[in-house]
Amino acid sequence: MPENNYPKLHNASWPGVVGKGPDSEPPISIDTMIELTANAEVDGVKFDGFDLFAADPHLDIDSNDDGIKELADKARAKNLEIGSLVAPVWTGTGGGSAMGSREERDQFVTQVRKACVIGKKLRDLGIRPNGVIRIDSSVDPSSWAADPAGNTKLIAQTFREACDVAADYGESLAAEGEICWGGMHGWKTMVNTLEAVDRPNIGFQADMAHTLLYLLGYNKEDERILPKDFDWSDRATLTEGLKTVTAALRPWTIDFHVAQNDGTVFGSGSHDKTGRHCQASDPNGKLDIAVDAGHWLRDENGNLTKKIRHICWDGCMFPNDVMMQPKTWNDILGAMIKVRQQHGWYEAP
């Protein structure tokens, strides 16, 4: 049998930008992130592509055709494809709160439209065979908590409008399950929000570092699964908790980030605290990366879903000195190869 060649293995470009800036470390350019990704290699296997932050300083959301083609050419020159795009929907990047004023919500939808335009052009250029547009609610949990029902309704309406726009470009939207985003900060809350959107092209983006925090009830104590002062050596209880969350969210999952987490929160720059992204080899990591990825990539009976055409490693808020070390990306690539070996499949080219 030939070796598994799906899902494709992607790195993320946004760790070079998110959590960086004037109040943290300098951003790392898209050229450098592409170079680091392309140079990684483990036993002859390399990354297949990268997922893209569709915002400055990596790619201007208002890029013209020449700018988009230039990026596609850079990827192609390194034998990399482009996958999912992060739409810059936040206040300060041209977007606005998904439960804010009409103007803010219109700005949110406009940013999604611009990301979809870029995504379609990259598809047309043949460099983006799969992927989604990633969004979040662009608002904090405490603001959402002032009126959970009303604010969920507003977020769902904004997402619905964004979905309708995305459909015009053949795109699907993946809402990121991250504890720092209101209406998305608990696993039951996330399901409620997705159900309220009621569009065929809305889905969930699971990130193993973030979804682990769902089990601990950070920012949503009433949805805690693991007991307080949980003993992390109790692998059986952890596994049952992971199964509970994945059973609820797997049917929605259309984008997947492989990651490690040590059970704590972290934020840098202007980014609120969220699930800490640890290095693949971190001795404090609480996840068995290859095994626990299977909860997302296989159904409740252990069968491969084959829904996820590429998986992405999210090293968000890694320090710059860590990201500039080739060993970091080789360790990550090695962990992702194990995921594909255990939960992948082969398709003839």
Image: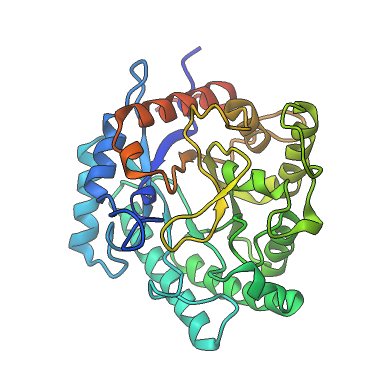
Relative image position of residue 300 (x, y in whole percent): 76, 35
Count all numbered tags in the image, as a single digit. 0
Residue at x 37% of width, y 58% of height: 119
Instruction: Indicate the quadrant containing the C terminus: top left, top right, bottom left or bottom right.
Output: top left
Residue closest to the eye, 130 or 280: 280
Residue 335 against residue 244 in the figure, above or below: above
Residue 287 against residue 263 in the figure, above or below: above
Residue 20 against residue 296 in the figure, above or below: below
- Left or right, residue 92 beside residue 97: left
- Which quadrant holds residue 324? top left
Residue closest to the eye, 113 or 315: 315
- Left or right, residue 166 beside residue 246: left
Residue at x 28% of width, y 54% of height: 26
Q: Is residue 90 at least partly visible in the picture?
A: yes
- Which quadrant holds residue 321? top left
Q: Which colour scheme is used?
A: rainbow
- Which quadrant holds residue 231? top right
Residue closest to the eye, 1 or 161: 161
Tell which residue pokes out farthest to the top in this image: 1
Residue at x 41% of width, y 43% of height: 318
Q: Is residue 347 at least partly visible in the picture?
A: no
Relative image position of residue 328 (x, y in whole percent): 37, 31
Tell which residue pokes out farthest to the bottom in this image: 102
Relative image position of residue 117 (x, y in whole percent): 36, 65
Residue closest to the eye, 324 or 8: 324
Residue 292 against residue 2 in the figure, above or below: below
Residue at x 36% of width, y 15% of height: 43
Relative image position of residue 338 (x, y in whole percent): 52, 22
